[in-house]
């Protein structure tokens, strides 16, 4: 038999029954004295007796229990230990609490990231996209108004129309939920339907070309069905914005003609108000395109806008049209009076108090009047009023882009470029990494006298304006033009010319950039490009034609300095003809200086020194130019007025010897020529005087000799006469007295 392991118990039935033991009463535990200090410990004898009693009870229990109750089967435990379930429950509670805390933190972080643009920019590096207008369709409740059902377009019958891209209007502009919506400027008599909401959204965002196909299709649709003024109004406005004024008026005339036949008496007034507003806005745009010749258009625009306001004074667009027409004509006070009307109606129409378009137009009027005033306290007051209006607009809507830009322009006009930089910081807070904001920061830095910072801002603006495909964006041309202007001021004309060539490759239709390139090309010595731009810009309206004729003369004179004699004569003749077509009154101060210089040079080289001196004297009366003074000295020298020439040469030399070595060299050479000419003239005068004095002495000597000879002859004749008279007297005396006498001779 195996010796190890647990032995099987023998059944109790086979065991002899033990004799029952008499139970002895347990002795009482010894008494504990509470007065003894320390921890009470039981007596060792008592503990031994207690152990013996326990053994006795165990043996007795074994005798009383049946054998079946004492049998045991050993088995391997397959699950957790005893009491382990409570531990797992505790662990689950702890992990659940931790997970809940983490999820709460994650929810808070996601909420902050979704609602805070600064957090998005810091954590995700997300660029802020420029907001655009969101159309607000607010229908007007009119008692008795019966909505006209809109015709349903039959796409099978008219399948050729090209719809505009569908943009859901429920999304805020370019995904910017924090951008303040634009105020409602017009209240449409019927809601927009069909493709009109998307087309109007594109129109409000300035995407006229994308909106026109849908607007044309919608207008064609209503022209064959039920009348709706919305299609006529928006289609005409889109056509006017792209310069198609005749087509726009045709659309509005069609809409106006249908009012009598296709509308009810209750609908007609509100429909006509929208058509009048369309006429007013189209007339305003055509008047602005005509410049000074748009007075008649402005008058009609005001009449039509007033007709719309007479029906519903809530049409803010009507006040804006009237005020803009006055502003275009320079009637600033009339414009301000017009914009004061909505302010007086704020109790009746509360939204006028928060209409940023009205507020910003008031700021523009103050700003334009300040510029027209030119300076002084009146101009400063208008600048401050304009700045306050722009500040108020930003208080209402901090995403009002024009308000940020106007505050910068006002600061620069007041000679505070530092304030312009601070205003730009606020601008870029709402439009971070915006190319236009960075360009204006460059302008402010340049005005502040920090060209390096300005160039850095322009470079950052160009980087921000790059599209995804690497092509320059719409702002790049203006950024390059501003940087080219700074390059010209720094004397880096070649870099300026390069920037302007790039800008014109982006927008070749920009005549103002071509005019600026003409100046940069002349400064860089590219006279062929300057002459070509001057010829191309004549009659374009980019600037007065006198500017381009002046540039033509300058390029001809400067570009043929090293040419042969015949080419030089031809260039001078052409330059003279170009100068005859220049009106000095239309030139700026710098251009008048250039005109005086090139005119003097042409007259001098063509052989008219007296006219050259007169032209130089006229120019020097306004400008103290060493170049013109040098030319006048050459004119004096050509006329032989050496003292005047010496004076002008000396003044040029004294002023330019440490500034411009070339002018100083020309002046020094002129002084040497004048000195040599003066010495030769003095020698000739001295020789002439000597000859004259010699001839005078010879003549005097001859005259004296002749006088002496004449005097000698006269003396001889007198003596002879005396002798004859004496002889006669003696003869007479002898005849009268015969006595002789002695005569004393």
Image: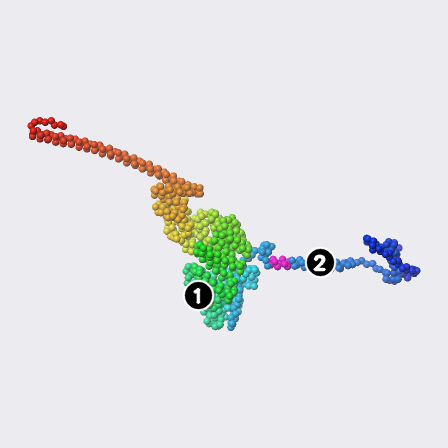
Q: Which SS class for mark 2?
A: helix
In the image, residue 738 sits, relative to residue 475, either above or below, namely above
Task: Judge by depth and name the residue closer to the eye, 90 or 526.
Answer: 90
Q: Mark 1 points at which residue?
A: 303
Residue 718 position, x and y percent, is: 15, 32
How is the rendered protein coloured? Answer: rainbow
- What mark, if any, has residue 94 been given in the picture? 2
Mark pair 2, 1: CA separation: 78 Å
Q: Nearer the viewer, residue 658 or 171?
A: 658
The quarter of the picture where residue 181 lies is: bottom right
Left or right of residue 76, residue 597 in this image: left
Quarter of the image with the C terminus in it: top left
Q: Is 313 located above or below residue 607 in the figure?
A: below
Q: Is residue 394 left or right of residue 333?
A: right
Measured as percent of width and height from the top left, residue 112 is found at 61, 58
Q: Which of 67 and 565 is in front in this view?
A: 67
Q: Would you say the magenta stretch is mainly helix, strand or loop?
A: helix
Mark 1 Cα-neighbour bin, 10 Å: few <14, some 14–19, many ≥20: some
User: Magenta residues?
Assistant: 106-114
- The secondary structure type at the circle numbered 1 is helix
């Amino acid at each position: 038999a195996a010796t190890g392991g647990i032995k099987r118990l023998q059944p109790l039935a086979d065991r002899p029954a033990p004799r029952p033991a008499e139970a002895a009463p347990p002795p009482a535990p010894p008494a504990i004295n509470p007065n003894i200090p320390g921890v009470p410990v039981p007596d060792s004898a008592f503990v031994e007796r207690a152990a013996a009693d326990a053994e006795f009870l165990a043996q007795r229990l074994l005798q009383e229990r049946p054998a079946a109750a004492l049998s045991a089967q050993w088995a391997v435990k397959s699950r957790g230990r005893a009491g382990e379930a409570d531990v797992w429950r505790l662990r689950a509670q702890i992990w659940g609490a931790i997970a809940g805390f983490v999820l709460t933190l994650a929810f808070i972080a996601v909420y902050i990231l979704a609602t805070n643009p600064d957090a998005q920019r810091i954590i995700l590096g997300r660029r802020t996209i420029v907001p655009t207008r969101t159309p607000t369709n607010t229908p007007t409740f009119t008692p008795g108004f019966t909505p006209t059902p809109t015709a349903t377009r039959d796409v099978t019958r008219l399948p050729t129309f090209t719809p505009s891209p569908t943009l859901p209007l429920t999304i805020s502009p370019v995904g910017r939920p924090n951008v303040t919506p634009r105020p409602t400027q017009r209240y449409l008599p019927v809601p927009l339907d069909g493709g009109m909401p998307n087309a109007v959204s594109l129109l409000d965002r300035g995407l006229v070309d994308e909106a026109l196909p849908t607007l044309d299709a919608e207008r064609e649709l209503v022209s064959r069905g039920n009348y709706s003024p919305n299609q006529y109004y928006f289609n005409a406005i889109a056509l006017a914005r792209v310069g198609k004024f005749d087509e726009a008026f045709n659309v509005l005339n069609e809409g106006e003609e249908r009012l009598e036949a296709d509308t009810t008496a209750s609908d007609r007034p509100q429909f006509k108000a929208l058509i009048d507003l369309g006429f007013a806005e189209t007339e305003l745009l055509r008047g602005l395109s005509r410049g000074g010749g748009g007075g008649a258009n402005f008058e009609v625009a005001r009449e039509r806008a007033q007709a719309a306001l007479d029906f519903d004074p809530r049409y803010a667009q009507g006040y804006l049209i009237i005020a803009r027409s006055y502003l275009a004509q320079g009637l600033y006070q009339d414009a301000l009076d017009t914009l004061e009307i909505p302010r007086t109606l704020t109790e009746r129409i509360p939204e006028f108090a928060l209409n940023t378009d009205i507020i910003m137009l008031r700021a523009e009027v103050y700003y334009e009047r300040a510029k027209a005033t030119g300076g002084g306290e009146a101009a400063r007051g208008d600048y401050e009023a304009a700045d306050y209006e722009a500040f108020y607009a930003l208080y209402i809507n901090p995403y009002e882009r024009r308000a940020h830009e106007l505050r910068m322009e006002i600061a620069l006009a007041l000679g505070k470029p530092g304030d312009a930089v601070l205003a730009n910081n606020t601008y870029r807070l709402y439009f971070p990494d915006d190319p236009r904001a960075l360009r204006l920061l460059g302008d402010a830095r340049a005005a502040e006298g920090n060209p390096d910072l300005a160039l850095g801002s322009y470079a950052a603006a160009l980087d921000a304006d790059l599209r995804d495909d690497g092509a320059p964006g719409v702002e790049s041309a203006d950024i390059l033009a501003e940087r080219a202007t700074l390059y010209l001021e720094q004397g880096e004309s070649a870099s300026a010319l390069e920037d302007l060539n790039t800008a014109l490759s982006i927008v070749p239709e920009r005549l103002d950039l071509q005019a600026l390139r003409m100046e940069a090309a002349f400064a860089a010595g590219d006279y062929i490009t300057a002459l070509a731009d001057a010829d191309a810009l004549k009659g374009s309206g980019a600037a007065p034609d006198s500017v381009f004729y002046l540039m033509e003369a300058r390029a001809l004179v400067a570009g043929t300095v090293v040419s042969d004699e015949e080419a030089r004569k031809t260039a001078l003749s052409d330059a003279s003809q170009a100068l005859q077509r220049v009106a000095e009154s239309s030139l700026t101060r710098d251009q008048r200086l250039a005109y005086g210089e090139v005119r003097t040079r042409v007259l001098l080289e063509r052989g008219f020194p007296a006219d050259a001196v007169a032209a130089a004297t006229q120019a020097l009366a306004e400008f103290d130019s060493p170049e013109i003074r040098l030319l006048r000295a050459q004119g004096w020298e050509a006329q032989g007025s050496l003292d005047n020439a010496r004076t002008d040469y000396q003044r040029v030399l004294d002023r330019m010897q440490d500034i411009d070595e070339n002018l100083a060299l020309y002046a020094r050479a002129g002084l040497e020529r004048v000195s040599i000419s003066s010495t030769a003239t003095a020698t000739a005068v001295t020789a002439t005087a000597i000859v004259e004095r010699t001839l005078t002495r010879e003549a005097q000597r001859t005259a004296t000799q002749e006088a002496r000879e004449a005097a000698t002859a006269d003396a001889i004749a007198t003596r002879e006469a005396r002798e004859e008279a004496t002889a006669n007297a003696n003869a007479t005396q002898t005849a009268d007295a015969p006595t002789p006498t002695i005569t004393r001779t």
